[in-house]
Image (spheres, rainbow, N blue to C red):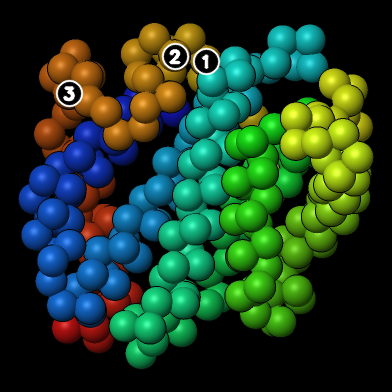
Amino acid sequence: MDLVETLKLYRETTRRLDRDYFNKLACGSPAQVFLMRAIRLVLDKYELTLSHRIVHSGGSNHDPPAEAHIAWLIGSASSILEQSADQLTEPSFRQWSWQLRSSVPWHALSIILSHICSQPWGPALDHAWTAVENQLVILPQEAKSDPFWNPVSRLLHQARKLHAEQAAKRATLGNTARLPETAPQVGSVECSAEGSLGPVAVGWNMASPGTSDDLILDTVDSEQWDAMMALVMDRSLTTFAFCF
């Protein structure tokens, strides 16, 4: 199965999980809500990884991905950072949240920081930068010994420099100031894979994640969906079974 078909299958899976499970758990006990959000966070990370690989597959500096797709990736990565922070700081989740402390959303951090370092600053990046800062506040010290920290820290150093420059411009010229269009290019986190941007843009609306398409739903193989849902539920329930 190629990446685009996998993304279609994933989104149908989450739609059915929302309908059959998550909508019921949303009003449940703190343990049930924690479990539901933890599973949803894992699923959102998976969607971001798939979408990032699809958007950047086959691209080049002369043929960049569509701005709408990049905006969606930044928004999705920001949402993951916010969800992660909420899971770790929500008082009612205190007795379980330690399970997630070692699960740092490195990919979401890398996506946001690489785009901050390679495109003009705008309102979407303001929001994303706030999500990054909030994540860094709760980042455990031991995470800095993780191999993923080194590339993230390099991006972070450059992003902080650009953020300071942007703040100085705003102080001088007002909030309408923007960074130069020739923002410095730094090493972004690249993923290459087979696939095409066309089917994503046409067959599945990247700007509106989670929406359904009747044609896509009709082509999802029921056995594939059952297998994916069983895998997600089995791993998540095994990890968080102690919540109940």
Residue found at x 59% / y 15%: 66
Q: CA distance from mark 3 to mark 1?
A: 20 Å
Q: Which residue is mark 3?
A: 217
Give the image location of residue 123, x and y in percent. 64, 36
Which is closer to the viewer, label 2 or label 3? 2
Q: CA distance from mark 2 to mark 1?
A: 6 Å
**What amino acid does circle 2 point to?**
Ala
Q: Residues within 10 Å of mark 1 (few under 14, many from 20)?
A: many
Position of residue 50 in the picture relative to residue 183 (left or right): left
Q: Which residue is mark 1?
A: 197
Mark 3 or mark 1: which comes first in sequence? 1
**What amino acid does circle 1 point to?**
Leu
Q: Which residue is mark 2?
A: 201
Q: Are marks 2 and 1 in contact (CB under 8 Å)?
A: yes
Give the image location of residue 118, x and y in percent. 80, 32
Residue found at x 53% / y 77%: 101
In the image, 180 versus 153, the foreground residue is: 180
The quarter of the displayed image where residue 2 is located:
top left
Residue found at x 72% / y 10%: 63
Which is closer to the viewer, label 2 or label 1? 2
The quarter of the displayed image where residue 132 is located:
bottom right
Element at label 1: helix
Q: CA distance from mark 2 to mark 3?
A: 16 Å
Depicted 129 relative to depicted 121: above or below: below
Q: Residues within 10 Å of mark 2 (few under 14, many from 20)?
A: some
Element at label 3: helix
Mark 2 or mark 3: which comes first in sequence? 2
